[in-house]
Amino acid sequence: MTPEEWAAFLEVHNDLPREGPGAPQDVQWAVQQLGLSGVLDVFDAGCGPGADTVTLAETLPEARIRAVDTTDTFVAQAQARVARFGDRVRVELASMADADGPYDLIWCAGALYFLGVTEGLTLWRDALKPGGHVVFSEPVALGPLSAEAAAFWEEYPQITDLAGIEARVNAAGYRVLGHRMIVGAPWQTYYDPMVARMDHLRATAMDPMVLAAVEENQTEVDRWRAARDEIAYALLIVAPE
Ligand SMILES: C[S@@+](CC[C@H](N)C(=O)[O-])C[C@H]1O[C@@H](n2cnc3c(N)ncnc32)[C@H](O)[C@@H]1O
């Protein structure tokens, strides 16, 4: 993307509650599965506008949380959302590749593919405390992709089924402890505010780059609608072997 295309993309994505599919129940599921409570160190990698950072802070009221993202507008939005938690929740403009730690939990919703599953988990091994876990979501093929689903994932040809993700996890020397699928309603929750934003921009925006970005994002939404029961992220709980 050119800087101008990126600016137009951000205009469409301005002030959306989240930047990918997911729900508070996903965070709560992982916390419950892992039996997490009390004073913990948590890293939210690629936090976007901070929806899960807020849920992590609410679900783990004694946790110290560091959230990072490389997009400054998302960082600013997340910082505003977590201000009510005070010093225990920090949001910084930084790369998730530079996780410091050590952490009890590294949470990464819809962002690990920027590093690569194997590459990212390998990087994070030293950022985990003994007994620590990574929970991440990753595009998954629920079966052979229909033409509509293949069109949706055309920019992510690396997509595999769950076994393929597990193989990438294992290649980093981790094992999968549990998973659940993110399909249907959490995608609707992600796209509904985007559709409203695009309707607003169609009525008000003059910049042709912004209008082109609207149509590009509309294509994504239309492709999701055409195959919504097939389009999924897997949310996986993993730990070093
Ligand atoms: C699909 S969005 C998901 C955001 C958020 N986790 C959510 O669910 O709303 C992916 C995010 O990863 C961020 N990102 C990409 N590469 C990154 C990196 N190296 N370090 C930190 N964040 C990164 C992007 O800026 C974007 O906000």
Image: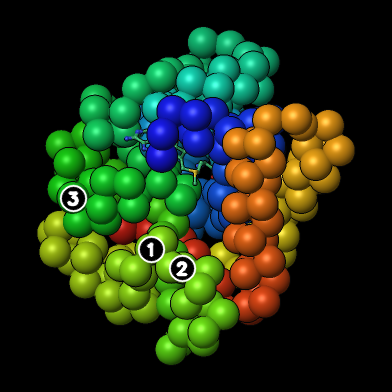
Of pointers 1 and 3, the one earlier in the residue sequence:
3
At 76% from the left and 50% from the top, the residue drawn is: 195
Number of the label disc, if any, that sits on residue 119: 3
Q: Report the quarter where the C terminus lies.
A: bottom left
Of residues 218 and 109, the one nearer the viewer is 218
Q: CA distance from mark 3 to mark 2?
A: 21 Å
Q: Is residue 156 left or right of residue 197?
A: left
Mark 1 or 3, closer to the camera: 1
Q: CA distance from mark 2 to mark 1?
A: 5 Å
Outermost residue, right side: 203
Secondary-structure class at tag 3: helix
Residue 98 is drawn in which quadrant?
Answer: top left
Secondary-structure class at tag 2: loop
Q: Does the CB distance between marks 1 and 3 fall below 8 Å?
A: no
At 20% from the left and 56% from the top, the residue drawn is: 118
Number of the label disc, if any, that sits on residue 156: 1
At 38% from the left and 63% from the top, the residue drawn is: 156
Structural crowding at the residue carrying mark 1, measured as other residues with C-alpha within 10 Å and reported as few (<14), some (14–19) or many (≥20):
few
Residue 211 place in picture, x, y as percent: 68, 41
Q: Is residue 91 left or right of residue 115?
A: right
Number of the label disc, if any, that sits on residue 153: 2
Amino acid type assigned to the residue bearing label 3 in the image = Glu
Structural crowding at the residue carrying mark 3, measured as other residues with C-alpha within 10 Å and reported as few (<14), some (14–19) or many (≥20):
some
Of residues 60 and 174, the one nearer the viewer is 174
> Can residue 58 be spotted in the picture?
no
Q: Does the CB distance between marks 3 and 2 fall below 8 Å?
A: no
At 55% from the left and 22% from the top, the residue drawn is: 73
Residue 166 place in picture, x, y as percent: 27, 71
Secondary-structure class at tag 1: loop
The correct choice, above or below, for 146 with respect to 120 in the image is below
Q: Does the CB distance between marks 2 and 1 fall below 8 Å?
A: yes
Residue 219 place in picture, x, y as percent: 63, 61
